[in-house]
Image (cartoon, coloured by chain):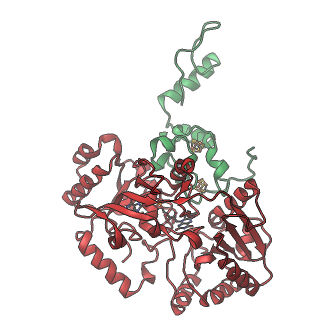
Chain colours: A green, B red
């Protein structure tokens, strides 16, 4: 179980969490490793890279200092700066208009496309 | 820089000059910051020789990078193109009879050992960063780590290295010639592949964790354990380091045995203790001690050094079984100079395992610098690979 954080300890860039990140293990690019995201967030870089994080928090589980990537907050900041992916925009719009991320659905209809951030 | 010709070599998707990539590749775990011009991710060892030819034509230099867990700025670029070898992850068939395996440079130690487990084998060099560090980076730094007291360093487990040098030439190094690549931190070229020797995986492991009242008692116990043939790891924590991970604020020894030598046998407890030990440096860094050193002193000098570090209140831990300790300092602590003066006076080594990189160049001696220059002239006369590192 992950505990709620009274404060979020900063990443010290050891890299120990790289291999638990499901996105990093496929792409093998530092920018999408938990460490890369932490460096970019720390510099206040508004980037669509933050949408590639699945928000799974596997990195926080293994992080020796318990750093949390806080993907939701970082994304909120990035959205506030006008940096958004088309998929994210569509998903949010769908939720606001139709109450679900898939868009208009008939009663009992199963969505044909999964719009994801 | 001609990115079109680079793209023709490795494919457009495998190069980047984005701000994001240039920032995150401008440093390694030492957080020494440089300037990254571009990043390339080769997918095959053959592409690396092409990259060297491209760098020569473009008059830029290349920095080999594995997992970037290095602690001395070895993978920090200085207006360089970073070559991230993380995608060279092929593991060849395991030769269980000869206890050998061929791997590409980007293979991560943790994945390799998972692959070897069903064969009852493992690569026994286990740095604290074993979950992330790459075989190429470990060869380049001649990594040691937690089990060095029993299994030595990477140099003891590498049978052959395939090296692409600064002129794009291929070398298949064996025997004595391995010394031109192992522990050279990439200044002679890119390690792209290696044949590794493997050890049988012990059927059982046990641990002993003991806190001591004074250093003399601790060193006496160290000597007793060093004489025990079952010993596989012997780790030290001074009271400041022990306290940082929630252990009693006294000096500790953590010993591992490949059979029933220790009193802790529960696998969960063993895993938890090693996890706490692996996390020691990050925890100390978080507490304001991010500068980690790694002197190595054999024999008597170690007792005096440990006493000084304890008296100065410097959090210290390390692989006491092989005389490597990790005192940790705040960013502006001037006692680092005093540390290396003491190490030199005792005839110790500036770096037991992390390497020299950019960080420790100032502490090297003339003989070391002459040796690096000789190797540079032989393998990389135009300084295309890891320019300005080591000397
Ligand atoms: C928490 C923590 C604990 C650690 N514990 C230990 C320990 O117990 N023992 C120990 O020895 N080290 C330890 N280290 C340091 C580090 O993990 C090792 O030096 C490791 O071997 C580096 O591997 P890497 O793949 O991350 O290499 P990188 O950091 O990417 O590179 C290290 C150096 O090797 C060069 N290099 C990388 N790959 C290649 C290649 N394929 N060809 C040529 N040159 C290359 C780089 O240019 C650089 O100079 C620790 C680090 C951390 C963060
Ligand atoms: S998130 Fe934690 S484990 Fe990952 S690099 Fe940062 S400090 Fe290390
Ligand atoms: S939370 Fe994001 S960065 Fe962390 S492991 Fe999951 S996908 Fe990777």
Total residue callouts: 0
Image spot of residue B367 (x, y percent) = 36, 86
**Left or right of B388 on screen, residue B53:** left
Tell me what residue is drawn at x 73 percent, y 81 percent: B221
Say whether residue B30 is visible: yes
**Left or right of B153 on screen, residue B229:** right
Q: Residue furthest bottom?
A: B345
Near-viewer residue (A78 or B22): B22
**Left or right of B23 on screen, residue B290:** right
Near-viewer residue (B190 or B313): B190
Image spot of residue B275 (x, y percent) = 67, 58
Q: Which residue lies furthest to the left in this view?
A: B57
Near-viewer residue (B94 or B5): B94
Image spot of residue B150 (x, y percent) = 58, 71
Question: In which quadrant of the rendered view does residue B289 lie?
Answer: bottom right
Near-viewer residue (B46 or B172): B172
Question: In which quadrant of the rendered view does residue B66 lie?
Answer: bottom left
Q: In this view, does B52 lie above or below A26?
A: below
Where, quadrant-wise, is the C terminus of chain B in this rendering? bottom left
Question: In which quadrant of the rendered view does residue A105 lie?
Answer: top right
Image spot of residue B146 (x, y percent) = 60, 67
Q: In this view, does B101 lie above or below B294?
A: above
Q: Residue furthest front?
A: B97
Say whether residue B26 is visible: no
């Amino acid at each position: 179980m992950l505990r709620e954080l009274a404060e979020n300890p900063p990443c010290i860039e050891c890299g120990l969490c790289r291999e638990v990140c499901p996105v990093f293990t496929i792409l093998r690019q530092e920018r999408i490793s938990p460490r890369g995201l932490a460096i970019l967030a720390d510099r206040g870089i508004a980037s669509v890279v933050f949408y590639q994080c699945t928000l799974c928090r596997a990195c926080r589980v293994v992080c020796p200092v318990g750093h949390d990537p806080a993907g939701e907050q970082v994304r909120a900041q990035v959205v506030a700066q006008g940096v958004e992916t088309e998929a994210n925009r569509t998903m949010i719009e769908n939720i606001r208009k139709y109450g679900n991320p898939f868009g208009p659905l008939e009663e009992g209809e199963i969505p044909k496309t999964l719009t994801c951030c | 820089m001609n990115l079109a010709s680079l793209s023709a070599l490795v494919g457009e998707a495998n190069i980047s000059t984005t701000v994001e990539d240039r920032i995150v590749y401008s440093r390694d775990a030492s957080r020494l910051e440089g300037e990254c011009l571009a990043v390339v991710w080769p997918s095959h060892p053959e592409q690396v020789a092409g990259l060297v030819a491209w760098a020569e034509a473009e008059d830029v230099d290349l920095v080999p990078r594995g997992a970037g867990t290095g602690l001395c700025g070895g993978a920090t670029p200085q207006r360089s193109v970073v070559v991230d070898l993380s995608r060279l992850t092929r593991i060849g068939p395991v030769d269980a009879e000869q206890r050998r395996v061929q791997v590409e440079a980007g293979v991560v130690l943790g994945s390799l050992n998972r692959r070897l487990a069903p064969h009852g084998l493992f690569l026994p060099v286990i740095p604290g960063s074993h979950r992330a560090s790459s075989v190429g980076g470990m060869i380049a730094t001649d990594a040691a780590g937690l089990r060095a007291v029993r299994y030595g360093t990477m140099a003891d487990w590498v049978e052959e290295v395939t090296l692409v040098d600064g002129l794009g030439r291929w070398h298949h190094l064996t025997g004595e010639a391995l010394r031109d690549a192992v522990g050279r931190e990439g200044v002679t070229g890119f390690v792209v592949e290696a044949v590794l020797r493997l050890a049988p995986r012990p059927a059982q492991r046990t641990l002993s964790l003991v806190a001591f009242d004074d250093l003399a008692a601790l060193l006496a116990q160290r000597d007793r354990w060093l004489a025990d043939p079952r010993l596989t790891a012997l780790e030290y924590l001074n009271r400041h380091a022990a306290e940082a991970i929630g252990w009693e604020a006294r000096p500790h020894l953590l010993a591992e045995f490949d059979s029933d030598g220790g009193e802790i046998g529960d696998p969960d407890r063993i895993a938890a203790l090693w996890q706490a030990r692996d996390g020691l440096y990050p925890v100390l860094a978080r507490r304001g001690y991010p500068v980690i050193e790694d002197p190595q002193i054999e024999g008597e000098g170690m007792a005096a050094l440990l006493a000084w570090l304890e008296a100065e209140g410097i959090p210290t831990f390390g692989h006491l079984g092989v005389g490597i300790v990790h005192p940790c300092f705040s960013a502006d602590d001037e006692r680092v100079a005093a540390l290396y003066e003491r190490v030199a006076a005792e005839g110790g080594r500036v770096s037991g395992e992390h390497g020299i990189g950019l960080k420790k160049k100032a502490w090297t001696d003339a003989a070391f610098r002459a040796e690096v220059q000789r190797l540079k002239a032989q393998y990389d006369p135009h300084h295309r690979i890891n320019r300005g590192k080591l000397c």
